[in-house]
Image (cartoon, helix red, strand yellow):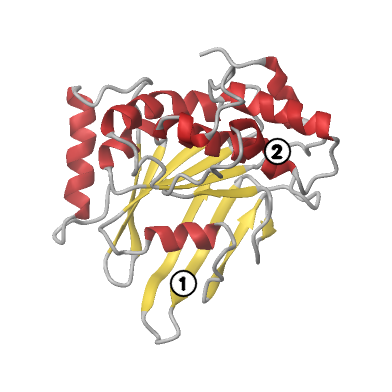
Amino acid sequence: MKVSRRLILLNANRPNVEQSINGTTSKHVLEASHVHFSYENKYTVFNDINLEINENEFIGIVGPSGIGKSTLLRILGGFLKPTNGEIYLMGNKIVKPVPELVLIHQSIITFPWMTALENVMLSLRTKKLSEDDMEKRAHAALEAVSLQGFAELYPKEMSGGMRQRVAIARALASDPYVFLMDEPFAHLDELTAEGLRQEIYNILFSSENPLKGVALVSHNLTEVLELADRIYILNNVPATVVGMLRVDMPRPRNPRSEIFNEYLDRLYGYLTPAGGKIK
């Protein structure tokens, strides 16, 4: 798919990805180191979680329902504080939410009284930009998700897939380093979700897009296999990383292919109570 060069606007005044925000360096874009998390009632959700996102990498996080995948995503974004352990963005410890980490919820959040363009511009209101610059960046973000020509539509005039694209464009316009995606296709019908999944990797990792990493939480193993470069598998109580699966399939990936189903069988196998660590 062709992406407009106007997306260069999204990259303005941005530090090189090889450097952290404070000038230090890190080989990982985002890293969780020895993360533990317990509720106030002492129930332990995670025990010694370690994972990382490398530059231009899409990771998946899967596990049984209720194991804490969404909680982990919120810890990665600085929205929840781990009981022990650290989260690092470009080598800098994260202790609160920062603009460089954007969480995309499973609910499609668009404001019905705003047009698509106004919804995207909302993410730029806190930046010191002129109205004209905000509009240019919002148009560039909409074009990145193939919504050029739909800027003046209101959410009620758009399909679910279009509204989710608006939410992704709004996140892109804010110039993040990492997307944290929590079941982003859960409320779309399967045909719409499949179509968006087929495009989302190229949208996010365009050569002109400043985004450098994505973490996707999903219960849909087919969805994760279609998108991820590596998949972290959570299991046990408290949850631990029982394995990491590297997905060596060319894109676009065919869910009906033999190799795809071999990967799928491995994932199912390691999510069962009798499953072990992935070799």
Q: Which numbered disc flags the more N-terminal residue, 2 or 1?
A: 2
Q: Residue at x 60, y 21 (%)?
A: 143
Residue tagged 1: 36
What SS does tag 1 mark?
Answer: strand
Disc 2 packing (10 Å; few <14; some 14–19; many ≥20): some
Q: Is residue 76 left or right of residue 118?
A: left
Towards the viewer: 266 or 186: 186
Question: Do labels 2 and 1 touch, CB within 8 Å?
Answer: no
Residue 1 pos. (x, y %): 50, 14
Q: Is residue 30 left or right of residue 243?
A: right
Residue 92 pos. (x, y %): 70, 57
Mark 2: which amino acid? Val
Residue 236 pos. (x, y %): 26, 66
Q: Residue at x 75, y 26 (%)?
A: 136
Q: Is residue 185 above or below residue 87?
A: above
What SS does tag 2 mark?
Answer: loop
Q: Which mark is residue 17?
A: 2
Disc 1 packing (10 Å; few <14; some 14–19; many ≥20): many
Q: Which mark is residue 156?
A: none
Q: Quadrant of residue 167?
A: top right
Q: Is residue 55 above or below residue 272?
A: above
Residue 56 pos. (x, y %): 56, 33
Q: Is residue 66 above or below residue 200?
A: below
Q: Residue at x 31, y 64 (%)?
A: 67
Q: Is residue 269 left or right of residue 251?
A: left
Mark 1: which amino acid? His
Distance from the alpha carbon under mark 2 to that under mark 1? 28 Å
Q: Quadrant of residue 138?
A: top right
Towards the viewer: 73 or 89: 73
User: Which residue, as the protein is rendered here, is positioned at the far top?
Assistant: 2
